[in-house]
Image (cartoon, grey):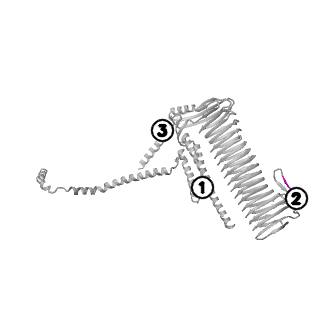
Amino acid sequence: METNFEDYLKNKRTSLDVETPDDDFIWAGIQRDLKPQKSFRFFSWKAAAIILLALMSGYVLNSVLNPTPKVVQFSLADISPEYAKQELVYQASIQKRWEQIKQTDYKPDDYADIFKEIDQLELLKAESIKDFKELGGNPRMVKTLFEYYEIKIRLLEIMLAEIEKKGNDKTKNQRDERYY
Amino acid sequence: MKDIIKKTGSLFILTFLLSFAVVASNYEKAGKIDKEFEINQHTRIEFTNKSSDLLIRKWDKQAVRLECNYKLKANEEEDIAKTIEALENLKVENSANLLAITTSIFTNVKSTILPGLMNKIVATLSNGTSVNLSEYEIEYVLTLPDNHDFKLFQKYSDLNMPDYSGNLELDLYDVDVRAGRLVNAKMLTSKYSNIIVGALGDCEVDIYDTDVEVETMGLLNMKSKYSKFEVDVVGAVNIDSYDDKLFFYSLESIKGQAKYTDFEIGNIKSGDLDLYDCELKAKDCEKLKLVGKYSGIVFNNIGIFEFPDCYDNKVDAKTVGEFSTISKYTEFNFERITGMIDFETYDDRLTVGQVDEDFYAIKINGKYAKIDLDIVGNPKFFIDVDFKYTSHELPPDLLFSNIDTKSSKFVASGRTEGLKSTDEVKVNEDNKGIRKANIGKITIEQYDGTLKIK
């Protein structure tokens, strides 16, 4: 049967090939099918590259324009994990006071001496971190770092008290102006 | 399903326990390294010690002995050997003038501590080699002759020290100190430490978050923050204090400035302080000069009390000889004034329970003040008043002349009954400089407020 079919094709080939394939039509069809997919891939890569480049440029530009000091992330958990919880309590306490301060209309310049104290405290913390690298996790360092947090909390409390005093003085002066 | 959970759990526990078996140390060594360094009579000794407890002893030899007691544990014997070798070869500078010993042997340490479970130390020695230890306990004993200049720099450890009479400088960071009489301690720098010491010399003290207890010392020149300083007997004190608690039970004098500090001080000859938001409690003071804001001040007796810049304070005293101030928003309560009041005031309150009958002078000039004075006995005085809108109450036996009462004023000159305008005023001064007079002088210029003189 197969032989017959092959013979049939051979004999009828010329009559079967009555029309030459329309290459342009077929190619247009292929292109139509392929083009949207290819275009999207090309576009997504391009977009990703552009976004990445933009982000990198922004980062580099920001680093150049706004140089920030390197902050060494150091946690009491680096000495011993059991202190991590206590550290979180301290950090939450600091955060709470900062939020209270930020709710006032304080001007940082008015409290320059307190910020100077905080700077000194940060320097001492940096010294402890340096010691941690040189000497390892001496448990005494935990005490020192707890002290760091306690003094920082104390300074923020002082700042809150100063903000309150300033408010009271302002009220007194306004009262004096009004009545006297 | 239960079976799978059970097996997984068992495997986890087994692995967990095995992990500790793996890190368990195989080698342990404890011992002592003993070194001695010859010095001459004038050699200065410097000892730098970080992270190891230190015991100092004295002897009569012109030499310094350093004993290192160690206890080491490691998985590898070689690590212990390398560490001991480093401990035997500490950095030492030894010349005729100086013996300097530094005990640090590591340049870098990474340690993990899980209390009761794990203690892992990965350290780099000064020569660059690395050692893994599970325990590193070092204690030094330093034996030195008395009378040498000695500087000690110590961190994160305990220090025990006997009496020492050489010139001494201590630089401490997180150290617990128990020391004897350091009678020539000239400089004490300390952070995060606790110090109990028998004596210090005339000493420059710079402390930060440090508690100090001293029995006796010479002159004290102190810069302090967040600290507690307690001394039984001290000479002249000069302070620059921030948020401290200071106790000077017996002292000659005190001078300086303080912010957010609480004081308790004994009898003093003189005080000269600039206070901001402080609490000062003191006994007697012969001569006191204060500048103060937002502070509470309590004295027992004060001879001459000058307060030239006073803002929003509360001041209490038993007896004051002569008192002068320029003040705003302050409350003064004195049980007794013996000689003089010179009060420039704005919205203050002054209450004096008793003004001596032989007072020298009372001068009040100000606005909105509330003043209440009780002159006891049978005083004789001349008085000039200039009130405007002032609610006043004066002794009934005063004789006034030249009275002007226009425009809510009361301006007048007067004297107590029995006095003549020609009577002579005789002023005398006691041995503490407090003036008294046979006839006092009162001058008041007041706007608004109240004045009561009984």
Q: Quadrant of the C terminus of chain B?
A: bottom right
Task: Please tell me in which quadrant of the rendered image residue A136 appears.
Answer: top right
Amino acid under label 1? Asp
Q: Is residue B198 left or right of residue B106?
A: right
Given the image, what chain letter belongs to the residue carrying mark 3?
A: B
Residue furthest bottom as drawn: B406
On residue A109, the disc is 1
Q: Is residue B175 magenta?
A: no
Q: CA distance from mark 3 to mark 1?
A: 57 Å
Categorize mark 2 by other alpha carbons within 10 Å: few (<14), some (14-19), many (20+): few
Instruction: Give the residue displayed 45% in from the left and 52% down from the top.
Output: A58
Nearer to us of marks 1 and 2 is 2
**Label number found at residue B22:** 3
Q: Secondary structure at mark 2?
A: loop
Q: Which mark is residue B424?
A: 2
Q: Which residues are magenta?
A: B425-429
Where residue A146 appears, as percent x and y from the top left, is 59, 48
Compared with B129, A114 (above or below) is: below
* Whether labels 3 and 1 share one chain: no
Cα–Cα span, label 2 and label 3: 102 Å
Query: Are marks 1 and 2 in one subunit?
Result: no
In the displayed structure image, the side of residue A42 where residue B185 appears, left or right: right
Label 1: few (<14), some (14–19) or many (≥20) C-alpha neighbours in 10 Å: few
Residue kind at label 2, given as amino acid type: Glu
